[in-house]
Image (spheres, grey):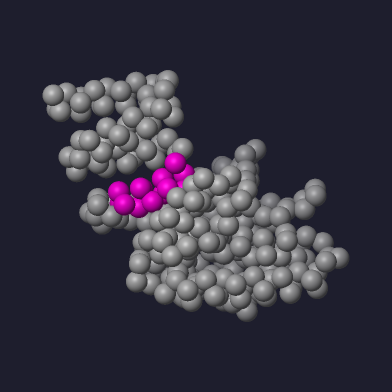
Amino acid sequence: MSDPRAALDAIGQLPDSEIDIADAALQLARVDEPDANWTEARDHLSEVARAVAALADTLADVDLPTRAVALSGLMGGRFGYKGDTETYDDPRNANLIHVVKRRRGLPVALGVIWLHAARAAGWEGHGVDFPAHFLVSLTGEKTQSILDVFNGGTPLSVRDLRALLRRVEGEKAELRPGLLRPMSARRILLRLQNNIMTRRLQGDDPEGALTCAEDMLRIAPDHAELWRQAAAMNQRMDRVGAALRCYDRFLALVPDGEVASQVRTLAGSLRSRLN
């Protein structure tokens, strides 16, 4: 689509399984930086897809770990993708157009490209919301290979995962059920954009942060907590009517519970200002 926000609205109506995660991330990158060369990034993603499909043809009869190593060699070797360890907080690291151009990015942004590659190969894969470090999993019938895309796609053993967890949670941390739980495409895209929204808030750009939240809601219109965040941003900028509309949308999605009660109180206080 020529209008990226129209594309995001359309994505918001799709079931998660039908979302083209790289295309969705590209549309988000376009709205974040309208003057960036998005067609060049799109062409590169097509090149990646062709290269991975050709690789997959040569690996039809090999096991999953061998496929994982081959994919790492292609993405981290031939295409040169790796994490940006020098300027990690650079906003470009969360914008797919710039990630493609620089071959550098945040773990989740790199993960989008790796999942795009796995899909082109016809391999099952998903994101992993590991504590403080996004990972990618390639899956087979009874096994999986966990890849650290920030470090060139290095396959991680159980020992590696435990060491990674302990760097985040302390030396006594142990692997536990749920740590490798799959992420949906929408959750991955929201995590990607949350990096941009957070950096804009930290940079005293509430208007930009709110715009980012509104674009996130285009692809995830039923994400209740994001409606609450958008309401709070509007309220801070004294946009009472917009804040109330966001709070009302939250309450339509989450009508009961402690948080809902808190939101009703906030909304009631705002409505009293309109009388």
Decide: is 199 above or below 249: below
Residue at 77% x, 53% y: name it: 140
Q: Is residue 79 visible?
A: yes
Give yes or no for residue 216 being in the magenta stretch: yes
Q: Is residue 135 left or right of residue 157?
A: left
Q: For the stretch drawn in magenta, what is the main secondary structure?
A: helix
- Residue 154, image x and y in percent? 64, 65
- Residue 22, image x and y in percent? 55, 61
Decide: is 272 above or below 208: above
In magenta, the rendered stretch is 209-221
Residue at 38% x, 72% y: name it: 36
Location of the C terminus (image quadrant): top left
Query: Dividing the picture into quarters, in which one does residue 63 lie?
Result: bottom right
Between 174 and 29, the one lying in front of the other is 29
- Residue 195, image x and y in percent? 40, 54
Query: Dividing the picture into quarters, in which one does residue 33 lie?
Result: bottom left
Decide: is 148 above or below 209: below
Residue at 26% x, 26% y: name it: 267
Residue at 67% x, 55% y: name it: 125
Query: Dividing the picture into quarters, in which one does residue 95 lie?
Result: bottom left
Give yes or no for residue 230 being in the magenta stretch: no
Q: Is residue 242 left or right of residue 172?
A: left
